[in-house]
Amino acid sequence: MDFTRRNVLGLGALLAGTAAFGRVPAFASSEPIKVGILHSLSGTMAISETTLKDVMLMLIEEQNKAGGLLGRPLEAVVVDPASDWPLFAEKARELITGGCAAVFGCWTSVSRKAVLPVFEELNSILFYPVQYEGEESSRNVFYTGAAPNQQAIPAVDYLMNEEGVERWVLAGTDYVYPRTTNRILEAYLKAKGVAEEDIMINYTPFGHSDWQTIVSDIRAFGSAGKKTAVVSTINGDANVPFYRELGNQGVRATDIPVVAFSVGEEELAGIDTTPLVGHLAAWNYFMSVDTPENAAFIEKWHAFIGDPKRVTNDPMEAHYIGFNMWLKAVEKAGTTDPDAVIDAMIGVAVPNLTGGFSAMMPNHHITKPVLIGEIQGDGQFDVVWQTAGLVPGDAWSDYLEGSKDLMSDWQAPMSCGNFNVATGSCGGS
């Protein structure tokens, strides 16, 4: 199994550091509880996922300073699946068979789909922190990122109702999340009366870098006399040349706004955002949110990472929420046994960073606010709109045939991820 140098030395460094100040945690047992971290540290997704590894190390370190869990220290076990989807499954198996009580990881849906059979086979727990396409509910996965009704649908509603958008470019990376999300959005737009000729759909491979023709096509599509917007599910480092080409071709937010679902503060840190001012992103958290909880989180993050310029983002908050939910569920269950923790997770509520509490629902999704942020010249987002309260995540879309009759409830006696309310039966895995 792969370990970073920080993992191997982390517990010893913590004990040595606290001993210097006479604050050694009073662990009842020296046997650690292992926590798996499954994020790409190399390859096309490293731009987004490396920070999630870092924040997990911070959260584990903070918890150890507070006394660990069940009287035992936590030990981070980090692997690098290197943006290689089959390797995610291999590394997940290593983490679980290596004794990890839970795993926090994945970004893309294709990586999540790759590891899902492993977690179900070995009956372990995955906390998945990134927005996704829905159409899934596993007993072994807790989805702390946004479902489509917590990001994609509200973003389209905002553009339609607040910006008067009538033509839609659905641009995404070519894999399951963008394709399924765009199927949902296409059905939703048509249900709202949008004509088929007013919807343009485009997919590009991971790591795509030549955006000149595609951006030119977007400009042409937007020249029909109707307000046009781009809904972007482009993932990873392809976002950098995409936004650069928007700037090169003078595509301004006042002309054709782009609302992104996979671009946050971390992705914008690598580019000049001056030409992108006014373009949008839809998330459930922004670093610019002004709450005491967020200010404390940012202060801890900067102290841990040793760089006051490092940003925070939405998936980091999702790991913050998921990790704290896991701690409470383990304490509630009195054990790290997966079956006991899975049952204990439902109903657990913890503070989020935007104010208030997020709760784990019976469908293994959480309640979250939805925010629309406008890109600023400093790479931050100004929140221009948000929901009045928290939105419960919906595992199954109301707009797709085969899904609209499904619900998920992992509590007994239903204990089913795809219960069909029309037939009164569980569809199985």
Image: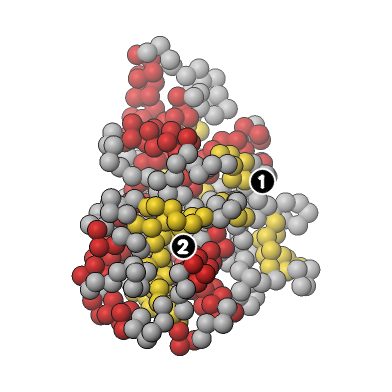
Secondary structure type for disc 1 = loop
Query: Residue 41 appears at what percent x and percent y?
Result: 32, 50
Rendered residue at 44%/80% (across/down) = 167
The number of discs equals 2
Q: How much space separates mark 1 and mark 2, taking CA atoms?
A: 23 Å
Vertical placement of 357 versus 105: above or below? Answer: above
Residue extending farthest to the left is 248
Pick whichever, 167 or 122, lies toward us.
167
Quarter of the image where the C terminus is located: bottom right
Secondary structure type for disc 2 = helix
Number of the label disc, if any, that sits on residue 109: 2
Rendered residue at 78%/72% (across/down) = 423
Q: Quadrant of residue 205?
A: bottom left
Kind of residue sitting beneath label 1 = Ile
Quarter of the image where the N terminus is located: top left
Q: Is residue 54 visible?
A: yes
Q: Please name the residue that numbered disc 1 is placed on.
A: 346
